[in-house]
Amino acid sequence: MATDKLSRTPRLLPEAETSMSETLHAVLFDMDGLLVDTEKVWGLVEAEVVDRLGGQWSPEHQERMVGGSWETTVSYMLGLTGADVPHDVVAGWLLDGMLTRLESGVEPLPGALELLTQVKAAGVPIALVTASLKPMADAVLASIGRHHFDVIVTADDVTRTKPDPEPYQMALRLLGVDPHHAVVFEDSPNGVAAATAAGCYVVAVPNLVPIPAASRRTVVESLLDVDLPFIRTLVQAAV
């Protein structure tokens, strides 16, 4: 049964929360566009790189690449422009542009730090699972705090990244958690596909691209719409 889009966060009584605590074993978070407001930065850097390649980058192009891998994005740019530039060179331009902008810090999205703090304080393991490269993840973590996460999986840690389930499967294995007792927060269709294929319950917080509600998936407008008691109800209902 699909879960309708939420307009508010249900609250549980303390005793109900306690009775469900054993069913939630981990919460996993995407990074870009979910915890931090980097999609705008991505758009600027992608436009600069494509301009350098002799082409033009539109919002429609960016939407196609949301949640995609570095390899896919660079290949798409080269296909779009027809430029005769080595793949690794373009990837370097993209990474350098992102790191330059992230050096001054990155802004967490509304509710992100509060939710991380709440989950961490309850002793529930947390993983960061991102399709970004490790240097980018490190730059973001310098702003939002590496201490929130028990496990960090980046594109450098896997053979296949989102929408393949490998990144989430790796995080679950490192945490020692069954996917049916884990909830994943994602903002992109690629990320949702990866988490779903890994067997997790998904909370989608669409950023640039709409995501429909579906079985074992709840759609919310913001991380402000969820809290730990509500996350526990999702797993309880799904297992």
Image (tube, rainbow, N blue to C red):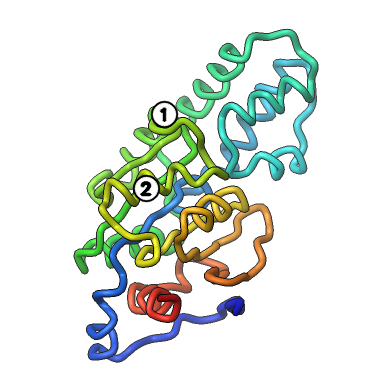
Q: Position of residue 227 (x, y in %)?
A: 38, 73
> Looking at the rendering, in which quadrant would you find the N terminus?
bottom right
Q: Residue under circle 2?
A: 128
Observer-nearest of 79 and 105: 79
Neighbor class of circle 2 (other Cα within 10 Å; few <14, some 14-19, many 20+) is many
Label 2 element class? strand
Within the image, what quadrant is residue 52 found in?
A: top right
Neighbor class of circle 1 (other Cα within 10 Å; few <14, some 14-19, many 20+) is some
Q: Residue under circle 1?
A: 156
Please report whichever mark, 1 or 2, sits nearer to the chain's N-terminal start: 2
Horizontal side, residue 113 vs residue 213: left or right? left
- From this view, report whether residue 2 is shown above or below residue 16: above
Horizontal side, residue 135 vs residue 57: left or right? left
Residue sitting at x 50%, y 21%? 96
- From this view, report whether residue 200 is shown above or below residue 129: below
Q: Tag 2: residue type?
A: Leu
Horizontal side, residue 202 vs residue 61: left or right? left
Q: Position of residue 3 (x, y in %)?
A: 58, 78
Residue sitting at x 70%, y 45%? 63
Q: Tag 1: residue type?
A: Asp
How far apart marks 1 and 2 lie (CA) works out to 13 Å
> Looking at the rendering, in which quadrant would you find the C terminus?
bottom left
- From this view, report whether residue 44 is shown above or below residue 79: below
- From this view, report whether residue 207 is shown above or below residue 76: below
